[in-house]
Image: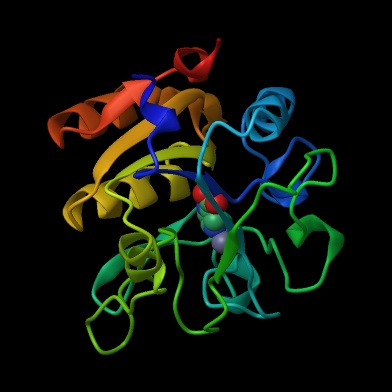
Amino acid sequence: MNPALSPHAALIVVDVQPDFMPGGALACHEGDAIVPGLDALLRARRFRHVVATQDWHPHGHVSFVDAHPGRAPFEQITLYGQPQTLWPAHCVQGTPGAALHPDIDWSALDAVIRKGSDSAVDSYSGFRENHGPHGVRPSTGLAGWLRERGVDEVFVCGLARDVCVLWTAQDAADLGFRANVLWDLSRPVTPAGDAATRATLQAQGIGIVDSTVFAG
Ligand code: VGL
Ligand code: ZN
């Protein structure tokens, strides 16, 4: 049976927002290339459960390079004992760059998880924030939302393949879901990292599939 037709499978669409598209504040390589295919997948109603994440930062967020005078964009610092990349300011709450992408029909969406709204903590995964000052990764509630709907398998797509898609898929697997990445419907910030991203996913037993498996 086509896996996506199972009532126990969910589609997680990560951070498909204009700021992650070419021309945006934190552009992914070819980020806009996923828009038509993702729109078609959503319109086809292949998934019983569809959730999107939305990167949603306040002004002056700790992950923004301008909050760290003297640092350069994409430089890495240590924050709360963990590596933190300093990003150009992006996905500021309420700005057009933070919207769900306007060229996608989102009417099939069941829920939106906004993340990164704690000004002191970054949040890559849709499931858990990054490490905060207390050494824990606070839950977003997404795992419980999925479990209460009987979901045991997730298909993760969106942006960026090497950051928020990767962390979301890894957390899904860690938290007991069968996890898959829709490779053709994701794009990275750094394409040179694709081989490492694949290897990391494979080592964790995360499926790498193309959305063509849902055709027909
Ligand atoms: C993302 C960096 C910072 C992403 C979000 O969506 O992959 N990357 N914030
Ligand atoms: Zn962000």
Q: Using the rendered image of the protein, determine whether residue 72 is visible from the camera's viewpoint.
A: no
Give the percent coordinates (x, y) of residue 197.
Answer: 32, 31
> Which of the 4 image quarters holds residue 67?
bottom right
Give the percent coordinates (x, y) of residue 201.
Answer: 25, 33
Image height of 191 relative to 107, above or below: above
> Which of the 4 image quarters holds residue 42?
top right
Number of callouts: 0
* Residue drawn 34% across the image and 67% down it: 148
Protein image colouring: rainbow
Image height of 194 relative to 116, above or below: above
Q: Quadrant of the C terminus?
A: top right
> Which of the 4 image quarters holds residue 7?
top left
* Residue drawn 60% across the image and 51% down it: 15
Q: Quadrant of the N terminus?
A: top left
Q: Using the rendered image of the protein, determine whether residue 195 is visible from the camera's viewpoint.
A: yes
Image height of 20 relative to 75, above or below: above
Return the residue nearer the eye: 15 or 68: 15
Q: Residue furthest bottom?
A: 134
Return the residue nearer the eye: 70 or 175: 175
Give the percent coordinates (x, y) of residue 55.
Answer: 60, 62
Return the residue nearer the eye: 120 or 171: 171
* Residue drawn 53% across the image and 72% down it: 116
Give the percent coordinates (x, y) of residue 181.
Answer: 39, 32
